[in-house]
Amino acid sequence: MIRQVVTDLVELVEGIDPARVFDLLVAVSEACTNAVEAHHRDGVGHAVAVRGVVDVDRVLVEVEDRAGGFTYPGEEGVPDAAGVPVEAGRGRGVPLMRALADHIEVQSSADGTKVKVTMYTG
């Protein structure tokens, strides 16, 4: 469902390369998967909120959960997706989002996590 919503959102913006739409869909899907898994892990019954903002030069999608947060080392401390060992089984989400989107912002606390995924036009 979220992929259709993001596709509909992107159709409101001119100038986004269709190949990049797929990248945005994958990045947002990864953020949603992480949020749903956090709710399941922590037994939280709240909904995951997804908001989209269309501007003249970008599409911004925010995914917010109300599960327990996680420690995020910031841009410098996160390896690229290729740098995470296969046997780790987890930990590729944020690096993958970083590789696919133009900008990723992660805000995490004990109250939950908000991930902002930005794709610029042109």
Image: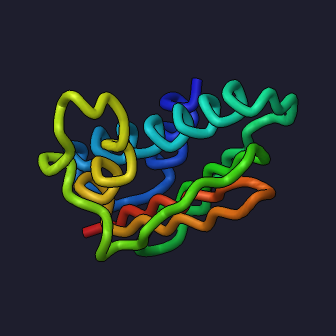
- Specify whether 33 is left or right of 46: left
x and y, in percent, of residue 27 in the image: 38, 45
- Specify whether 115 is left or right of 67: left
For image coordinates 47% across by 59% down, the residue present is 117
Q: Residue furthest right?
A: 45
x and y, in percent, of residue 17 in the image: 23, 53
x and y, in percent, of residue 97 in the image: 35, 51
Q: Quadrant of residue 18?
A: top left
* Residue nearer the viewer, 44 or 103: 44
Q: Quadrant of the C terminus?
A: bottom left
Q: Residue furthest front?
A: 87
x and y, in percent, of residue 45 in the image: 86, 29
Q: Quadrant of residue 103?
A: bottom left
> In the displayed structure, would residue 26 be above or below residue 61?
above
**Coloring applied to the structure:** rainbow
Q: Quadrant of the N terminus?
A: top right
For image coordinates 36% across by 35% down, the residue present is 90
- Specify whether 47 is left or right of 4: right
* Residue nearer the viewer, 101 or 66: 66
- Specify whether 103 is left or right of 17: right
For image coordinates 44% across by 38% down, the residue present is 30
Q: Quadrant of residue 113?
A: bottom right
